[in-house]
Image (spheres, rainbow, N blue to C red):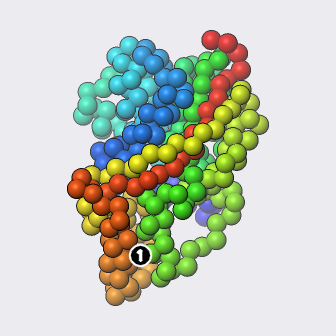
């Protein structure tokens, strides 16, 4: 099966869990959403595009920023994610946000449609990040900005590595090519920045966002959440015999203890934010 179809199947299987944990996930990544909106210069009454919206974030949060006179469009290639996003928009009674199934490298919008374009933790999994950035530029109005968020190095993000270090003691992680779809595909500073420049982004800039991922759940619940969020992690665990699964569970929860607080778990985190404009003037 082609690699991109493998990714689509994994995200399809994970969609119900991302919907189930949507509020915890929204809170964990709220600082990233805020930073993307700031760097893309999102403001009231604008029209904003959220590429790879998943179950609706950051589109749903941005809908509050643009207000009832603005409009947000979220797209995702996973139908189950889009369905979850629509359910939440309906539950919240939001009339200024819509969601559609579409690919990042073939956006269903006319040129010069949007005032801002955002992508939070999606570009790392695109078959062609260059084509996706070019499409985002195509649908942006001249002079308007896009902003993309990707994970910095794994060892600076215990949200990921605290558990992977435990699991990898029992199952050797498969080798990952430098351009294979992976959470840390663009962890090296300058890598995504260069792609954006080659795609035509004007004056692209990169900054490191340091923040804390606040997960308002105890360690046991967080372990269950991470298992459900990650199809790859569930696949690894399914390969273990029962006694090793129990040991991984014990060690994983133990590894989270240093991040425990009275309010749940709190992880230091680092993300790269790459932003820039479409050629032309506003």
Name above or below for residue 64 compared with residue 124.
above
Residue 229 in picture, x, y percent from top left: 39, 58
Q: Quadrant of the C terminus?
A: top right
Q: Residue at x 47, y 51 (%)?
A: 269
Give the quadrant of residue 265. bottom left
Which element carries disc 1, helix, strand or loop?
Answer: helix
Question: From this viewpoint, is residue 117 visible?
Answer: no
Question: From this viewpoint, is residue 282 visible?
Answer: yes
Residue 110 in picture, x, y percent from top left: 60, 21
**Left or right: where does residue 275 sit relative to residue 225?**
right
Q: Residue at x 37, y 47 (%)?
A: 28
Name above or below for residue 61 compared with residue 260.
above
Is 255 or 99 nearer to us in this picture? Answer: 255
Give the quadrant of residue 185. bottom right
Q: Residue at x 31, y 48 (%)?
A: 24
Q: Quadrant of the N terminus?
A: bottom right
Residue occupied by mark 1: 237
Residue that sits furthest to the right in the current view: 198
**Quick one: label 1, few (<14), some, or many (20+) residues within 10 Å?**
many
Is 279 or 231 nearer to us in this picture? Answer: 279
Give the quadrant of residue 255. bottom left
Residue 31 in picture, x, y percent from top left: 42, 39
Is 265 or 14 nearer to us in this picture? Answer: 265
Name above or below for residue 154 compared with residue 58.
below
Q: How many marks?
A: 1
Residue 9 in picture, x, y percent from top left: 49, 58
């Amino acid at each position: 099966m082609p690699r991109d179809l493998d990714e689509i199947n994994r995200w399809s299987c994970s969609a119900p869990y991302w919907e189930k944990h949507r509020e915890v996930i929204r809170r964990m990544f709220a600082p990233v959403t805020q930073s993307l909106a700031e760097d893309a210069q999102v403001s009231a009454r604008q029209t904003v595009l959220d590429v790879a919206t998943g179950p609706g974030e950051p589109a749903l949060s941005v809908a509050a920023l643009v207000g009832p006179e603005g409009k947000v469009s979220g797209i995702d290639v996973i139908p189950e994610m889009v369905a979850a996003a629509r359910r939440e928009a309906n539950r919240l009674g939001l009339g200024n946000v819509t969601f559609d199934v579409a690919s990042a490298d073939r956006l269903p919008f006319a040129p010069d449609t949007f005032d801002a374009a955002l992508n939070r933790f999606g570009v790392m999994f695109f078959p062609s990040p260059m084509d996706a950035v070019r499409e985002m530029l195509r649908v942006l109005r001249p002079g308007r900005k896009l902003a993309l968020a990707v994970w910095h190095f794994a060892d600076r993000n215990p949200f990921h590595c605290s558990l992977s270090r435990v699991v990898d003691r029992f199952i050797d992680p498969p080798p990952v090519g430098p351009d294979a779809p992976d959470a840390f595909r663009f962890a090296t500073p300058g890598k995504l920045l260069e792609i954006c420049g080659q795609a035509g982004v004007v004056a692209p800039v990169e900054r490191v966002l340091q923040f804390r991922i606040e997960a308002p759940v105890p360690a046991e619940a967080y372990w269950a959440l991470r298992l459900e969020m990650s199809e790859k992690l569930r696949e690894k665990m399914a390969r273990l015999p029962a006694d090793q699964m129990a040991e991984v569970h014990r060690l994983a929860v133990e590894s989270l203890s240093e991040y425990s607080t009275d309010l749940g778990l709190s992880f230091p985190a680092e993300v790269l934010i790459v932003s820039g404009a479409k050629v032309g003037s506003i």
